[in-house]
Structures are given as structure tokens and as C-alpha cells.
Image: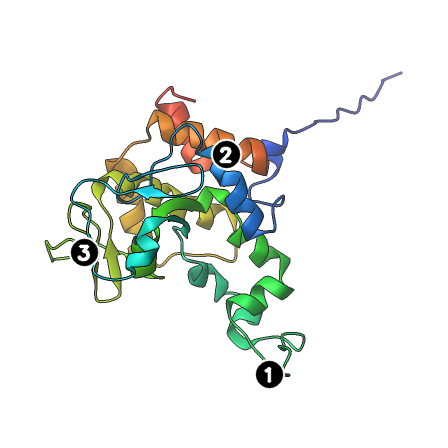
């Protein structure tokens, strides 16, 4: 008589879940990220140091002509802008019957998507896509897509972050991390898709600017809290033998 055996495979949550399904609150994600960065407090674009309260010590030669007050603290930047993935949701585009303010006026956009759609909240709070940035840099970058720009002029003095014609060119030191965030978001969430041009740029930057030990450590810390890996970063770290 043949015996039939049933095998039950128990998957680690890091492998079973491709995207964030743990943290819905953008506010809570920002609080958690302060602990992720406690041993390496440095902003994405300008390499500025910040303290446990988010107060910035700007790098030598950093200047800004706009949003001066916001240059004093970090803000948590959606590398893939919230609008880029938010506009895929009907609540963002068209609103919802329950998106009505205290004065009876209907609203749509980010606030409505956040109120009504759980998938949007998970995407907005995904820590793999959130990086510290000087507030003034975050403000000027806005929701612009990244590109290579013809201008050689930096908008922030010694920090080579360039903004021109609704496009942004980040410093070389940030490009690899940016690319792997874009590639992760597209892989993890079916509602988000890059343009062909953007995907080509991010794929190129991913190859040109390899992972660092710090990037790999950051990804591990986030995975331990959020319970999913950035599989793009993880695979690159494994290839470099630093995972």
C-alpha cells in the first residue's frame, strides 16, 4: 500500500510578501525610519547629516534660494512620487462619495486616496521608497520625474541636485538607490508602472551605481520592520556578497 505524504511549506514573510502589507500609516512609517537611520543619519541627495529630531547640518557650500525654512529639517521623500502611483487609483483621479469635508465640499487626490484605499496607504507608507531629504530639496523636487539634464547648474550650491523644466537630475551618489527604489515599486505593486524611458534610465543607473554596505543594511532593517524585502536591493547585495 502506498503512503501519501503531504508537505507543508512554511514561507518566511520576507519571501511570501512582495509588497508592504504591514504599515498603513505614513506617519508611523516616518517614525520607524528614524530608528532605521539612527546609526547613519545622512540625507539621500546632499549627504547632509541630521540628528535624532531631524534637524539638519547642511554640507559645506549648500545653498537654497527657496523654501529656506524647510532647509532646517529633513522630510521623508517619496523617491517614486506619491502622485506617480496615486493617479492609478480612482479615488485620486475622481474622488469618492465619502470624500467630503466638514463644509460638504467633495475632494479627491491624495487625501481621498489615503482615506478610502488601503492599497494606496500601503504604497504611500512603504519605507523602501522613503528616504530622508533636506526639506528645501524635497520641496523643489516636487513630484518631478528624474532625468539627465543639459544644464550644469546646481540649484543647491555644492549639492549637485538640478531642477529644470519639471525634471530633476540627482547627484551621482544618489542614483543607484533611486533606481532600485523605482524598480522595486514597479515589481512590488501591479498598480504602478514606469514609462519605457524611465525604466531604461533606472535600469542603467542600477548597473552604473552599485549597492553599498549601508544600502544593504538599510534594506535589511526595513524588511525586519515591514516584513517584506526590497528584492531588487537584496539580489544586488547578494551578488556583491554583502547580504
Per the image, the residue denoted by label 3 is 155
Per the image, the residue denoted by label 1 is 105
Task: Write down the quadrant of residue 181 in the picture.
Answer: top left
The x, y position of residue 131, in whole percent, is 40, 44
- What is the distance, in whole Å, between disc 3 and disc 2 at their CAs? 30 Å
Per the image, the residue denoted by label 2 is 35
The x, y position of residue 200, in whole percent, is 29, 50
Dot 2 lies on which element? helix
- Crowding near the residue tagged with mark 2, few <14, some 14–19, many ≥20 C-alpha atoms within 10 Å: some
Residue at (22, 40) in percent of width and height: 59
Residue at (58, 75) in percent of width and height: 95
The image quadrant where one finds the N terminus is: top right
Q: Which of 231 and 72 is in front in this view?
A: 72
Task: Write down the quadrant of residue 120 in the picture.
Answer: bottom right
Q: Which of 188 and 64 is in front in this view?
A: 64
Task: Write down the quadrant of residue 49 in the picture.
Answer: top left
Dot 3 lies on which element? loop
The x, y position of residue 121, in whole percent, is 58, 56
Return the mark for residue 197: none
The reply to whether residue 70 is in sight is yes
- What is the distance, in whole Å, between disc 1 and disc 3 at their CAs? 38 Å
The x, y position of residue 212, in whole percent, is 32, 28
Asked if residue 146 is positioned above or below residue 30 in the image, the reply reads: below
Q: Is residue 206 left or right of residue 91?
A: left
The reply to whether residue 183 is in sight is no
Amino acid at each position: 500500500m502506498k503512503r501519501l505524504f503531504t508537505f507543508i511549506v512554511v514561507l518566511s514573510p520576507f519571501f511570501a510578501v512582495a509588497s508592504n502589507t504591514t504599515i498603513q500609516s505614513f506617519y508611523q512609517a516616518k517614525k520607524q525610519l528614524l530608528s532605521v537611520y539612527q546609526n547613519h543619519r545622512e540625507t539621500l541627495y546632499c549627504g547632509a547629516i541630521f540628528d535624532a529630531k531631524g534637524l539638519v547640518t547642511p554640507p559645506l557650500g549648500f545653498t537654497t534660494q527657496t523654501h529656506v525654512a524647510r532647509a532646517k529639517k529633513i522630510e521623508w521623500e517619496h523617491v517614486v512620487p506619491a502622485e506617480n502611483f496615486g493617479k492609478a487609483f480612482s479615488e485620486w483621479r475622481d474622488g469618492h462619495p465619502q470624500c467630503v469635508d466638514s463644509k460638504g465640499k467633495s475632494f479627491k487626490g491624495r487625501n481621498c486616496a489615503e482615506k478610502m484605499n488601503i492599497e494606496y496607504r500601503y504604497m504611500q507608507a512603504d519605507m523602501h521608497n522613503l528616504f530622508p531629504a533636506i526639506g528645501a530639496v524635497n520641496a523643489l523636487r516636487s513630484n518631478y520625474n528624474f532625468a539627465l539634464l543639459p544644464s550644469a547648474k546646481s540649484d543647491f550650491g555644492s549639492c549637485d541636485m538640478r531642477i529644470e523644466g519639471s525634471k530633476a537630475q540627482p547627484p551621482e551618489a544618489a542614483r543607484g538607490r533611486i533606481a532600485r527604489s523605482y524598480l522595486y515599486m514597479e515589481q512590488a505593486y501591479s498598480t504602478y508602472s514606469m514609462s519605457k524611458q524611465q525604466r531604461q534610465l533606472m535600469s542603467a543607473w542600477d548597473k552604473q551605481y552599485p549597492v553599498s554596505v549601508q544600502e544593504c543594511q538599510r534594506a535589511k532593517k526595513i524588511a525586519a520592520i515591514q516584513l517584506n524585502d526590497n528584492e531588487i536591493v537584496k539580489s544586488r547585495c547578494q551578488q556583491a556578497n554583502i547580504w
